[in-house]
Structures are given as structure tokens and as C-alpha cells.
Amino acid sequence: MLQPPHSSLQVAAVPAPRVPARDRDQDAPWHTEAVCRRDEAGLFFAPSKEPTAARLSREEAAKRVCARCPVMVECREHALLQPEPYGVWGGLTAAERRVVLARRRRRDLELKKTARSANRIAAAG
């Protein structure tokens, strides 16, 4: 019987310690330290016509890899700033990144409204 492609994936239960960006080699790009560079790319990107159950399982396995990655935050910010439309980046799926971006946009709008109100009050006072 054929095994699913990632059924033998063993992931450490304890995340690797995060190395603060200031302690890393500043000349090397963040992705050189990414744990996913050692895993197969198929874990992070969906094949065409992937069944839902298989997609969810694959995404959870990818997120476990991300959870032990020392550059997870940099990876996530890269995916949010680009924005990356596909795959698991920084422990987030494309749909999860869309939610984060929508929340950031709402927060930014609220901050701008608050700043405008404060400026009007200061100008009137």
C-alpha cells in the first residue's frame, strides 16, 4: 500500500530556540537559516486538486516545521509584505495571511482616525 508523502515526517516537539535578529550574521539573508530549506517544498505548497483533508494535514505538518524555525518571524513578515499568495510562510497559510493583512488595514485606519481626532482637538484647544 502506498504511504501518503508526508506520513513519515518526524517533527521535534520542542521548538528550536529563536536567535534574535541582532545576534545573527547581518550579511546573510534571513532565509539561509530557514528550517524549510531542508524539507521538501511540496509540504509548503499545495499540489493541484489536493483534497481538503490532505491539504489540512499537509498544512499542519508545514506549520510544525515553521514552529521550530529560527527565522519564522522574518519569513512571516516577508510573506505579508510581498504579499505571497500561495503556500505556508512563517506558520501561516495564504488564507490566514489575508486575515492578518485585513486586521492590519483596519488597525491602521483606526489609528489614522484617532490621530485626526487628536489633531482636531489640539487645534481647537
Image (cartoon, rainbow, N blue to C red):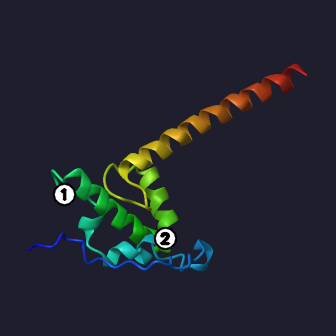
Q: Would you call the spot at circle 1 few (<14 residues within 10 Å), some (14-19), or many (20 or more)?
A: few
> In percent of the image, x 53 and y 80: which residue is there?
25
Residue 115, horizontal then vertical, whole percent: 73, 32
Q: Determine whether label 1 and label 2 are within 8 Å by CB.
A: no
Provide the secondary structure element on which disc 1 rests: loop
Q: Nearer the viewer, residue 43 or 33?
A: 43
Provide the secondary structure element on which disc 2 rests: loop
Is 30 on the left or on the right of 11, as rendered? right
* Outermost residue, front side: 1
> In percent of the image, x 49 and y 57: which residue is there?
77
> Which quadrant of the figure has residue 113?
top right
Residue 56, horizontal then vertical, whole percent: 31, 56
Residue 34, horizontal then vertical, whole percent: 41, 74
Is 50 on the left or on the right of 105, as rendered? left
Q: Is residue 43 above or below residue 28?
A: above
Identify the mark nearer the N-term, 1 or 2. Answer: 1
Between the residue at mark 1 and the residue at mark 2, the CA separation in whole angstroms equals 25 Å
Front tag of 1 and 2: 1
Q: Quadrant of the C terminus?
A: top right
Q: Is residue 122 above or below residue 10?
A: above
Which disc, if any, is residue 71?
2
> In percent of the image, x 54 and y 37: which residue is there?
105
* Outermost residue, left side: 1
Residue 21, horizontal then vertical, whole percent: 58, 72
Which disc, if any, is residue 47?
1
Which disc, if any, is residue 113?
none
Q: Quadrant of the N terminus?
A: bottom left
Q: Would you call the spot at circle 2 few (<14 residues within 10 Å), some (14-19), or many (20 or more)?
A: many
